[in-house]
Amino acid sequence: MTVSRALKTPALVQLGARERIAEAIKQLGYVPNQAASTLASAKSQVIGVIVPSLSNSVFVETLTGIRDSLNQHGYKFLIGESGYSPERESQLISTYLAHAPDGFLLSGIEQQDTLREQLATNNVPAVRMFDLGTSCDDVTVGFSHEEAGYSIARHLIERGYRQPGFLGAQLDPRMMKRRHGFRRALSEAGLNPGVEVLTPAASTVELGTQMLGQILQQAPDCDAVFCCNDDLALGVLFECQRRGLSVPSQMAIAGFNDLPWSAFANPGITTIVTPRYQIGFTAAQLLIKILRREPIDNPNINLGFRLAIRHST
Amino acid sequence: MTVSRALKTPALVQLGARERIAEAIKQLGYVPNQAASTLASAKSQVIGVIVPSLSNSVFVETLTGIRDSLNQHGYKFLIGESGYSPERESQLISTYLAHAPDGFLLSGIEQQDTLREQLATNNVPAVRMFDLGTSCDDVTVGFSHEEAGYSIARHLIERGYRQPGFLGAQLDPRMMKRRHGFRRALSEAGLNPGVEVLTPAASTVELGTQMLGQILQQAPDCDAVFCCNDDLALGVLFECQRRGLSVPSQMAIAGFNDLPWSAFANPGITTIVTPRYQIGFTAAQLLIKILRREPIDNPNINLGFRLAIRHST
DNA sequence: CTGAAAGCGCTTACAG
DNA sequence: CTGAAAGCGCTTACAG
């Protein structure tokens, strides 16, 4: 018992005893048994984190933010990939629930009802990332994808492009919101919002190279594209180079996320800078506050985004 | 007790009892307590995985291989980032040991002695990934980085480049082995192996753009570069385009890893295709064999690599 | 095929 | 400031 106290609350243990304990721990190579601790205290110090995919570096950066925040407070975390599937997400939650996590960090705000029930019956709090909730029941940290799509379109319109097209992959809810904002701006400006190529495939550079051909076939007068992710934009750029299309005079390219190389491409790619590290960090901080029952002033935190204008538009 | 059996070994429980149990589980939303199971059985079904970094997509793909393999067998895994630091690696192992992992999957073969002791005293088996061990005490899955560097150099020499340079970042042991092989081939061919730029910074596209300038300043007649990772190579490619250097006639570029976009760059980047998914999958399979005490025919598995020749050289 | 007993290594709550 | 008691929810090993 005194050993336990020496480890958790050393201030309550006499110095002499503390020293003897430290000595013994060293000699024996003692490591506290986390399973026993979890069982006895009903606190695991584990947070379940579920992101859509680890192949997308956006989510990896979010994980870094989560880690930096959680490490400060002694929490570990279990990482799960939902593959953008709500069913898979629910299934992961079930598995993780067996580890008695203190809380969850989830992606998106479109969780299944069964998942919400699971969380409620087990009384485990969750913070949702990447998107903005409206209800006060949800705790969310993100930004408006609709506004982001809108602002890219406004930029292209102001630059004078007459037939911007949309290149969308994955087709997850947040991507569809970006598309919605993009189309809204085009419609408002009296331009045709219907030039687009959509595919449920994951967005990759390779896919971008293919999609340029597809949109040009559909709309030969397309003079700008908004790619729902920067890797698509890079593929479009490579393909323009191969076809001898000059960027941006013959084809303007805008991306999304500001991946680490976007600014260094030739030309630099205009894109929306998203605060993904900050989303992870903030979401984790918020969850910790909830676990400590500290008051939360705003359960729906909008971290915003920034339009980075570069030479590709 | 019968419930426990119904879950673990349903064959030993009568059908009627099994059905009543399933019904009750559903009604109560029962989830087995993993901590209690771990405590009672001394088996956690958890594998500790430590990779140098998650920012490098190479390691993310390895994680995918590990996940695919481990999921089949009901294991979960804890992911740690060592940041290429052996000290940090040891520290992570200590933390993870508290979760009583059944085994570890580690990166590289240069672990600290203290780490080896930790593993030995706790009697936890480990498989080392990405490099090749020589001793039968170690279990390793990887390929020869020295040979890979050598084969890139041979390719450049055969193509007729007279002054290939080396661009190295991170300076981790595996990178240094690639460099060693590269230099050996140049020396054997009577070429100058001393043209190189090295930096401990993480390899990024941005860094690649800077390193091209540095190596040209040092050796203006440098006509080819071997970049220790493809993202460096992409940065070099962008910078060549900006400077109006034609690739490969004025500057040949070779990379390493075959990242997803390397084949689609303009021109496609010559690189070494590394089997990182397979490394993760195989290492996990091997660890499971060890945990089941099945015999292992070869503790040092060489998965090899492939030279992909594209238009950048 | 089923169940009662003991114990895994901690923590909580209480007594000294 | 220290320690003895009980219990967390499972599994192991044994008895029926």
Image: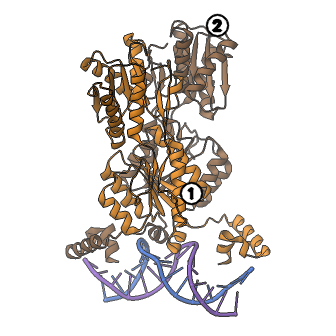
Chain colours: A brown, B orange, C blue, D purple
Residue A54 in picture, x, y percent from top left: 52, 41
Q: Nearer the viewer, residue A213 or A133?
A: A213
Local crowd size for mark 2, using a 10 Å CA cut-off: few (<14), some (14–19), many (≥20):
some
- Residue nearer the viewer, B166 or A133: B166
Viewer-proximal residue among B165 and A179: B165
| Outermost residue to the left | A16
Q: Position of residue A154 (x, y in %)?
A: 54, 15
Location of residue A250 by image quarter: top right
Q: Nearer the viewer, residue B120 or B84?
A: B120
State the SS at label 1. helix
* B251 relative to B72, above or below: above
Marks 1 and 2: same chain?
yes
**Which residue is disc 1 drawn over?**
A96
In terms of secondary structure, where does tag 2 sit? Answer: loop
Q: Is residue A132 above or below residue B239?
A: below
At label 1, which amino acid type do we have? Answer: Tyr
Residue A78 screen position, x and y as percent: 50, 53
The residue under the point 20% across, 75% down is: A16
Quadrant for the N terminus of chain A in the image: bottom left
Q: Residue at x 63, y 19 (%)?
A: A183
Say above or below: A276 vs B245: below
- Say which amino acid is labelled 2: Asp
**Can residue A104 be seen here?**
no
Q: Is residue B202 left or right of residue A184?
A: left
Q: CA distance from mark 1 to mark 2?
A: 51 Å
- For residue B143, say whether it is visible: yes
- Specify few, some or many for label 1: CA neighbours under 10 Å numbering under 14, 14-19, or 20 or more: many
- Where is mark 2, residue-wise? A221
Residue A51 lies in quadrant: top right
